[in-house]
Image: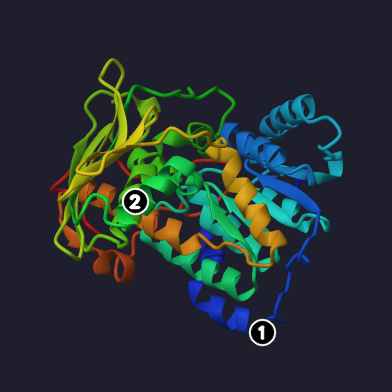
Amino acid sequence: MSNQHETSVTRRDFVKTAAAASIAASLPAGFGVFAQGSDSFKVGVIGCGGRGTGAAIDCLKADPAVEIVALGDLVPDRVDSCLARLNKEFAGRVKVPAANRFTGFDNYKGVLSVPEVNLIVTAAPPGFRPIHFKAAIEAGKHVFMEKPVAVDPVGVRSVIATAELAAQKKLAVVAGTQRRHQKRYLEMMKRIQDGQIGDIVAAQCYWNMGDLWVKLREPNMSEIEWQCRNWLYFSWLSGDHIVEQHVHNIDVVNWAMGAMPKTVMGMGGRQVRTAPEYGNIFDHFFVEFEYPNGVRAASTCRQTKGCHDRVEERIVGTKGVAWSTSSATRITGQSPWTFEAEEINPYVQEHIDLIASIRKGAPLNEGRQIAESTMCAIMGRMSAYTGRAFSWEWAMNTSKLDLSPKQYAFGPNPVDPVAVPGTTPLV
């Protein structure tokens, strides 16, 4: 498993959602579960880039009983850089011998094979997450899984099936939607649910920002390795930035609404980031979601250098407006309120909550929740790419879109051309 050129596997070999229920039925109750009050958290990390390393650090900060014991990534240099940073910041709690460091497309299998691993942090690019999540739950591991959790409807359905399997096996699943664990958002949502802003009549959410890093292809890199290193810009890996990043804000709107949208209509384009290193994604989107009660939410996201930044969610009610930005969370209107309390870093808090739920013997399971919000973001992208409006029911139950490559192996990997609304088909 440590040879990155040996393995060729397909996601279709692993995304077999129909089998999940029958597998779960054969398992003994409580299979793979920590004893209540357990103080042993041996963590394996799948995906050792910036977010995977950051999530491992957050997990270590969350509880002194956490130790990192296995690392896996597509390429050796990211395993090495992750290990170096973890050792620098948490000497004595990082115990990853050479035998527990895995590379190649099957690196996740190596991490899951380490006997003492009982908690997985999976943070490889989103296109891999349905595979890694399914394998981790089948192996009896608790999971912290970064958002988003898929890039297409086939992947979403796989994640939902795996989340159901996790529930039957009493395994914890927490997603990287840290706002769901953040005190300011929890207090704001309680006030919304208690009627402080009245009936919800509209919502808006935004992730409008500047440009991000880009990796140029080096002469010795295969096409698929470069895509994986430059994963933000390929829809099969990231889902596009509306999915990879804006899912946070869309998830907050779904949380406030207490429902998923019934229809979607979107638009977008690729106006600024047009060079080959920007892969096949768009650089701006506008999407309108309509919820079952007729309320409409406007969703915008942009990654363009030199433009105005706005990262925010606004929930509009008949008695007031609840809104949250990086600097303030408040309600205006008939019953004004401003969040002013201290709060724990939400990136750490989500790991605190995960571990606490395992200790209590009442494991959290956010799998369906994050899968459904991921689907909303995917729907926004699909609508913008094709110029078509469609329903939640069609996307969840009928769409056959599967962006996974024909095989996971180092070498060529042709990708779809940049979408052209009105021409690109809705699948």
Decide if residue 234 is in sight here: yes
Q: Secondary structure at mark 1?
A: loop
Residue 197 position in % (x across, y down)? 23, 49
Spot the residue most to the front. Answer: 335
> Taking 74 as reference, is 336 left or right?
left
Query: How many labels, in total?
Result: 2
In the picture, the quarter occupied by the C terminus is bottom left
Query: Along the line of sight, which residue is nearer the eye, 190 or 165?
Result: 190
Image quarter of residue 304: top left
Query: Along the line of sight, which residue is nearer the eye, 39 or 68?
Result: 39
Q: Residues within 10 Å of mark 2 (few under 14, many from 20)?
A: some
User: Residue at the location (28% across, 25% down)?
Assistant: 274
> Taking 246 as reference, is 345 left or right?
right
- Residue 181 vertical placement versus 323 (above, below): below
Which numbered circle lies on residue 260? none
User: Residue at the location (57% across, 47% down)?
Assistant: 350
User: Residue at the location (48% across, 31% down)?
Assistant: 230
Q: CA distance from mark 1 to mark 2?
A: 43 Å
Query: Along the line of sight, which residue is nearer the eye, 251 or 239?
Result: 251
Label 1 or label 2, whichever lies nearer to me, is: 2
Q: Secondary structure at mark 2?
A: helix
Residue 395 position in % (x across, y down)? 28, 64
Which numbered circle lies on residue 26? 1
User: Residue at the location (17% across, 48% down)?
Assistant: 319
Residue 159 position in % (x across, y down)? 49, 63
The residue under label 2 is 191
Residue 103 position in % (x across, y down)? 70, 42
* Dot 1 and dot 2 residues touching (CB under 8 Å): no
Q: Amino acid at mark 2?
A: Arg
